[in-house]
Image: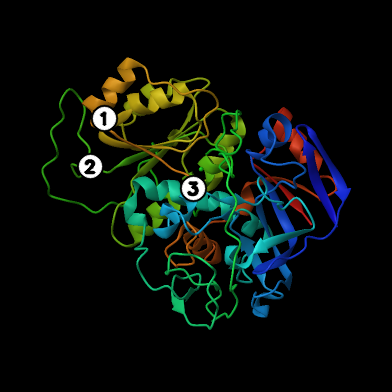
Amino acid sequence: MKAWVLQDINEIRLETVELPALESGQALVAVKAAGICGSDIPRIYRTGAHRHPLIPGHEFSGVVESVGKETDSAWLGKRVGVFPLIPCGACGPCIKGQYEMCRNYGYLGSRRDGGFAEYVAVPAGNLIELPDCVSFEEAAMLEPMAVAVHAMRRVLPEESRSESGPTGDVNASGQVVHGGSAKPDWSEPGPTGAVNVSGQATHGGSAKSDWSESGPTGAVNASGQTTHGESRKPEQALPSETDGIGQSMNQPQTDAVAPQAVGGILPAGTGVEETIVVFGLGTIGLLLTALLLERGKSRRKSGGSGGRVLVIGNKDFQRQKILELGLSAEAYCDSRAQDAGRWILERTGGRGGDVIFECVGRNETLRQAVDSAAPAGRICLVGNPASDMALEREVYWKILRNQLTVTGTWNSSFSHKASDDWHYALERLSRKDLMPSRLISHRFSLEEMEKGLHIMRDKSEDYVKIMAVI
């Protein structure tokens, strides 16, 4: 088969290599689409991977061509997405079902051979079946979508459904269906093997999966964009109904007494519509914005408030993308020309943002996030750190005095339950509520994939998501 093989730092080339030998519980996936993550760039060109030689790539989808021993043959021919993190199943987080925080994980594309190839060996427990209405390109974006979902749910917990519900197979609507799948070898008794998103029962799954392999955290993206592959690490929504300054319209009227401002600042949690701010509009920031707009539309349909969304970017094409998402131009701040912190305060009557996502990973944007947060606000740190991060004394004081909640987010949840991040994303893909393929700026064949790597490495062109289509 053909594969891009990373022999050493800055030494990647297209080679002809042997097909992967399948181990027990694995499936051979013929790759149909593979996205380049921002974390792939430092891994290939600056820091290297956990081992060499290695085939990179953790954002991919394809078709199951063959299966190993103790892997249900019902997987054969299935269209699948792939969760790249391979948990050990035995550590503390795994026992709790928090596989994204596994202490001894493997990872396709950084610790094991990944998707920049014609074929990949994948533990069957990492497969998620795709409905016919979801394209391979969309499915290759499930990983960054799920990362954005995970970040959103960290500070907007009402978007999380209980993880303690039924443990059977699930479809794209979150409904439990019944099949006779064998369970993967996970220590936590909840997850089951096969996952069906088409609304029909499946019988796939693996009897065993290899959930071993340990090592340090992966490469850090220094580009200032959120990457969230295995590296240290975060479609299009239908247009949001907003007024000229990005405020949601059609909100229910109330006779409640307006909260009193102190020094021009309104405290959070007083019934005032929440303002959500996204700093950084790389792939994760744009997907997060799309998810927030879809969330707002859904909540308004059910008679609630979705809050208003403000975004901070620094490129002309980012402004164009948020307009395509349905956000008004007045809700976009170009940080090259405006002070983002002051801009947020001006649009919130001096109150600040109730929820802030920092999707850049730089000291200056972390400082601005703290400065522009409302009292009792929540800040979610999403972006990979571009350098050492430090808290100045005054920034630290503001966290204390404003009683801010600061949380991190890492990877995404994939528990084989309808409530996990991957099924949340896949459900919306299936309903066409989100159309992430519109964020694909470049498509290359596998043979030409290095052109995409160079565009991202050299920043020679504007891009959002670069995809290899096989």
The answer, for residue 206, to whether it is visible in the render is yes
CA separation, marks 3 and 2? Answer: 41 Å
Q: Of the two numbered discs 3 and 1 on the same chain, state the one appearing first in sequence.
A: 3
Quadrant where the image shows the N terminus: bottom right
CA separation, marks 1 and 2? Answer: 11 Å
Q: Of the two numbered discs 1 and 2 on the same chain, state the one appearing first in sequence.
A: 2
CA separation, marks 3 and 1? Answer: 40 Å
Q: Residues within 10 Å of mark 1 (few under 14, many from 20)?
A: many
Q: Which mark is residue 161?
A: none
- Label 1: which secondary element: loop
| Left or right, residue 274 beside residue 177 | left
Which residue position is annotated with label 2?
272
Q: Position of residue 423 (x, y in %)?
A: 49, 63
Q: Residue at x 45, y 67 (%)?
A: 417
| Closer-to-camera residue (318/58) | 58
The answer to whether mark 1 and mark 2 are in CB contact below 8 A is yes
Residue type beneath disc 2: Val
**Closer to the eye: label 3 or 1:** 3
Q: Residue at x 53, y 34 (%)?
A: 384
Residue type beneath disc 1: Arg
Which residue position is annotated with label 1?
351
Q: Position of residue 11 (x, y in %)?
A: 81, 35
Q: Residues within 10 Å of mark 3 (few under 14, many from 20)?
A: many
Q: How many marks?
A: 3
Res 276 quadrant in image: top left
Which residue position is annotated with label 3?
103
Furthest residue in direction left, as rendered = 257
Furthest residue in direction top, as rendered = 393
Q: Of the two numbered discs 3 and 2 on the same chain, state the one appearing first in sequence.
A: 3
Residue type beneath disc 3: Arg
Q: Position of residue 221 (x, y in %)?
A: 60, 32
Q: Residue at x 42, y 53 (%)?
A: 93
